[in-house]
Image: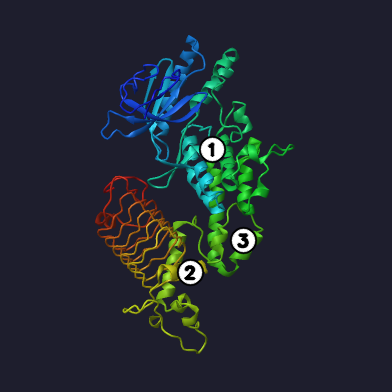
Amino acid sequence: MSYCYNPACTNPANPDDATLCQACGTNLLLHNRYRCTKILGRGGFGTTFLADDMVLPGKPNCVIKQLRPAASAPHILDMARQLFQREATTLGKVGNHPQVPRLLDYFELEPEFYLVQEYVSGLTLQQEVKRNGPMSEGQVRQVMLEVLPILDYLHKIEVIHRDIKPANLIRREIDGKLILIDFGAVKDQVSQAMMANPQDYTAFTAFAVGTPGYAPPEQMAMRPVYASDIYALGVTCIYLLTGKSPKDLGYDNTTGEFIWRSRVNISNDLQNVLEKMTEVSIKHRYQTAQDVLQDLQLVQKRLDLQQFSSPSSVGSDINQGLATGPLHSRPDPSSRSTGSLPTTVSPATRHAANAARSQQARAGLQPNYSRFAPPSTRVPARTSGAAQTPPSQVSYDNNPHGGSRLTPQTLMAAYNRGERDFSESRLDNLVLRKANLSDARFVQAFLQKADLRGCVMMNVDFGRANLGGANLRDCDLRASYFVNADLQGANLQGANLREASLTNANLRGANLQNADLTGSNITPNQIAQARTNWFTIHPNGKRGIGI
């Protein structure tokens, strides 16, 4: 399908092979280069198209934003032109960030103006919530930890986004990163310019100043500040937690604040952070993205210390709250029963914890494999002075090699009962896709040629495990521990290995194409032994081959 970009066209849909619009006769090749194939959105400021770049090899997709003033008077067009050029300059500068779409082209076809940007394939956070329901506290904290550095970057280069909302945050399909789209600088700058010329205001009424509900009061009054973006992100997080848009939440008539706390089941600490982010008064709101990040990171450090200083009392401390200082983040409820570290723990702390667990296993604290067996064959747990059946005598499928071989059914049944330790288990050739095995232990397990595509295995201990030839494509392996593991020939294409420990892991012939190794503990020599491509993200956060 080809779409006519003429705003006055009454029937813009055309066949793929059409060169001229059948309704209005407009040349369908915009700027002699771009063929619009789909309308992504319409608004008062213009239309957004998905388009093919017919000049570049492969005809890659791009996004074209058509901007048009609401009036055609010469002085209005001149003002719009100046603002458009300023906007293009801003977008060109902003696009240097890897989580912001790049500006590819811009041009004017009077009376319209066109911006061409990189196309990002994936679902918006709004679409994710509509598809999967509200997010958990841990998921929302992760969104904050990913978006706040983007805002910090923008604010440092003196750019205010002005339209932070769930529909403007896309989880990029290729690597799962959040991408901030749809910068509203043109709209806001026009609105600000019109404040100096009230007589022309009606010509620009279509240029919004942000999305009502997400934009704070000062922004709706056309006086945005950096803290305005923080407010909008706070409201976005409330939407992610509740699934309710601001207009559906209601307001406190006295304070003007949203009524949302009774709709969520989260820690008081996260509530405190969100309350401060969404303060109506700028004076009492977080002033910078770094302020919010520092609170989140401070809380996480204290949680790390709690985990190591008194593991048995962590649950009660978290439930009761600490009396000293503000707490703005807590581990997910799902992780409390296992004693595992939350996913936002610092890499060094997590690596140390995993190493300690592996050391316990090497010291002889071996798991009781019989707990995986059916009740009729289960071996009693070790008691003082009592003999115990060795793990090698437990077998569910007559495994001739000995050891505890688990089927997908017995593995998931044990995991769902709360079991997490599957060390030395035989899982070779196991087929288990898109399962959640986070926080499990597979120390010295046999996972050769196992098919675990799409599994979520965050913070999993694979120390000294044999994963030769295993299929771990698109797995979420964040913060997992692969020290001394054998990953020769394993398929890790598209895997999320952020902050993973891969010290001394054998990666010869492993496929790391499209994998994300940001912050992971891995050497250049290990990477050189594996297969990478231009979409591989290296530990320094950069893409490419041989970085």
Residue 178, horizontal then vertical, whole percent:
45, 43
Please state if 465 lies on the left or on the right of 384 as rendered.
left
Q: Is residue 365 visible?
A: no
Q: Nearer the viewer, mark 1 or mark 2?
A: 2
Along the polypeptide, which appears first: circle 2 or circle 3?
A: 3
Along the polypeptide, which appears first: circle 1 or circle 2?
A: 1
Q: Which residue is mark 3?
A: 318
Residue 134, horizontal then vertical, whole percent:
56, 49
Q: Which residue is mark 2?
A: 413
Residue 250, horizontal then vertical, whole percent:
68, 39
Q: Is residue 510 visible?
A: yes
Cα–Cα span, label 1 and label 3: 30 Å
Front-lying residue, 182 or 19:
19
Cα–Cα span, label 1 and label 2: 39 Å
- Residue at image position (44%, 68%) is 409
Q: In this rendering, is residue 74 above or below 60?
A: above
Along the polypeptide, which appears first: circle 1 or circle 3?
A: 1
Q: Residue 165: which disc?
A: 1
